[in-house]
Image (cartoon, rainbow, N blue to C red):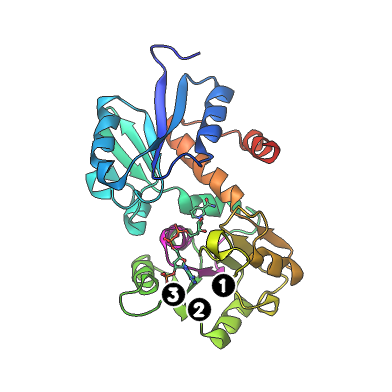
């Protein structure tokens, strides 16, 4: 029941209506008996300052942010977590009595979605893409002990996102970083041959790029690597199909990452764990 004390949380995005976040968070509030609700708000980029101000005015508990607002809010927050500063984007805000704290749980979502037995210490990670999702994953992996990160991007010139990401990663001590052009197939093959974890963080495989993959063919995969696809619709992208045909034993689509980034946000707000299995069952049955 909604009461006079019900706390409101939400998603600010543009568009926002397609999001799975309201289902996840409302299910988790109900599971824990927390008197709160989560709503999706379509916030146009030019309205982001007013929307942030509304968090304080209406005393919202917190919000998630999605495209295209994640970068824009950063300068307007009272405090930003170190990983979010490095990534340059915030996907979760907590309202502490009017003091707005910014976090980024996207990369953590990916790390949590990987098999926890394998760990990241000393591993070689190869990421296709250098956009927001790739950056979040790469920074988090670098902060969590990965040995080497290879970024493979379409554009690799001086002001490209590929180059910018490499510069950011070089600020995170200890990690070896390499930038490859997507079209440099001989270097790509060599890099994939030694990679422990390969992540597709490009849009190749969904929407207008359905049936496409950043990998030319299945011969680039090795059976022992972990193949991670950030796309969750379709459930098996071309990238995952190639991995399966190459005999890759451990492959994942973007759904566990989506759930885990939401779980990390839920924990920031409530100090409670999201009921992951309940959320997965609901998503699989809907
Ligand atoms: P983004 O910031 O727009 O970055 C897109 C990346 O893809 C860039 O590196 C871009 O290369 C590359 N790219 C785009 N079109 C390409 C093409 N035709 N050929 C080769 N490369 C191309 O997007 P994002 O927010 O990082 O999202 C990337 C993917 O991750 C999307 O599929 C998104 O749905 C998914 N995602 C999933 C989750 C989850 O929870 N599962 C969370 C966030 C994102 P250039 O730099 O050269 O342009």
Q: Give the class, few, some or many, for how many residues have Cα within 10 Å of label 1's Cα (few <14, many ≥20).
A: many
Q: Quadrant of the C terminus?
A: top right
Instruction: Name the N-terminal-most of marks 1 and 3.
Output: 3
Q: Secondary structure at mark 1?
A: loop
In this orientation, which residue lies closer to the viewer: 241 or 87? 241
In this orientation, which residue lies closer to the viewer: 161 or 149? 161
Q: Nearer the viewer, mark 2 or mark 3?
A: 2
Q: From mark 1 to mark 2, how far is it between C-alphas?
A: 7 Å
Q: From mark 1 to mark 3, how far is it between C-alphas?
A: 20 Å
In this orientation, which residue lies closer to the viewer: 158 or 112? 158
Quarter of the figure with residue 278: top right
- Residue 35: percent from left, percent from top: 47, 18
Residue bearing mark 1: 214
Q: Is residue 180 left or right of residue 159?
A: right
Residue bearing mark 2: 182
Q: Is residue 157 left or right of residue 144?
A: left
- Residue 223 appears anywhere in the view: yes
Residue bearing mark 3: 177
Q: Nearer the viewer, mark 1 or mark 3?
A: 1
Marks counted in the figure total 3
Q: Give the class, few, some or many, for how many residues have Cα within 10 Å of label 2's Cα (few <14, many ≥20).
A: some
- Mark 1 C-beta closer than 8 Å to ligand 1: yes
**Is 137 one of the magenta-colored residues?**
yes
Q: Secondary structure at mark 3?
A: strand
In this orientation, which residue lies closer to the viewer: 77 or 37? 37
Instruction: Name the N-terminal-most of marks 1 and 2.
Output: 2
**112 relative to 38, above or below:** below
Residue at (38% x, 11% y) in the render:
4
Q: Is residue 217 left or right of residue 159?
A: right
Pointers 1 and 2 in contact (C-beta within 8 Å): yes
Q: Which residues are magenta?
A: 120-141
């Amino acid at each position: 029941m909604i009461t006079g004390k019900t706390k409101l949380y939400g998603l600010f995005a543009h568009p926002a209506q397609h999001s799975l976040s309201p289902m996840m968070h409302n299910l988790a509030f109900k599971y824990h008996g927390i008197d709160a609700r989560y709503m999706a708000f379509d916030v146009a980029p030019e309205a982001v300052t007013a929307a942030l101000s509304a968090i304080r005015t209406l005393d919202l508990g917190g919000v998630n942010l999605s495209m295209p607002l994640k970068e824009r809010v950063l300068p307007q927050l009272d405090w930003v977590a170190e990983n979010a500063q490095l990534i340059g984007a915030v996907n979760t805000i907590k309202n502490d009595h009017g003091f707005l704290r910014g976090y980024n749980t996207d990369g953590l979502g990916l790390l949590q979605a990987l098999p926890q037995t394998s760990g990241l210490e000393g591993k070689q990670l190869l990421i296709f893409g250098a956009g927001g999702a790739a950056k979040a994953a790469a920074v988090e992996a670098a902060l969590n002990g990965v040995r080497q990160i290879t970024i493979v991007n379409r554009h690799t010139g001086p002001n490209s996102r590929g180059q910018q990401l490499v510069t950011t990663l070089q600020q995170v001590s200890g990690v070896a970083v390499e930038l490859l052009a997507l079209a440099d197939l001989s270097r790509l093959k060599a890099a994939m041959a030694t990679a422990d974890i390969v992540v597709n963080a490009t849009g190749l495989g969904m929407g207008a790029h359905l049936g496409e993959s950043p990998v030319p063919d299945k011969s680039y995969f090795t059976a022992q690597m972990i193949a991670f696809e950030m796309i969750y619709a379709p459930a098996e992208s071309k990238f995952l199909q190639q991995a399966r045909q190459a005999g890759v034993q451990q492959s994942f689509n973007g759904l566990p990452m989506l759930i885990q980034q939401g779980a990390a946000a839920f924990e920031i707000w409530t100090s409670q764990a999201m009921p992951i299995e309940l959320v997965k069952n609901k998503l699989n049955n809907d």
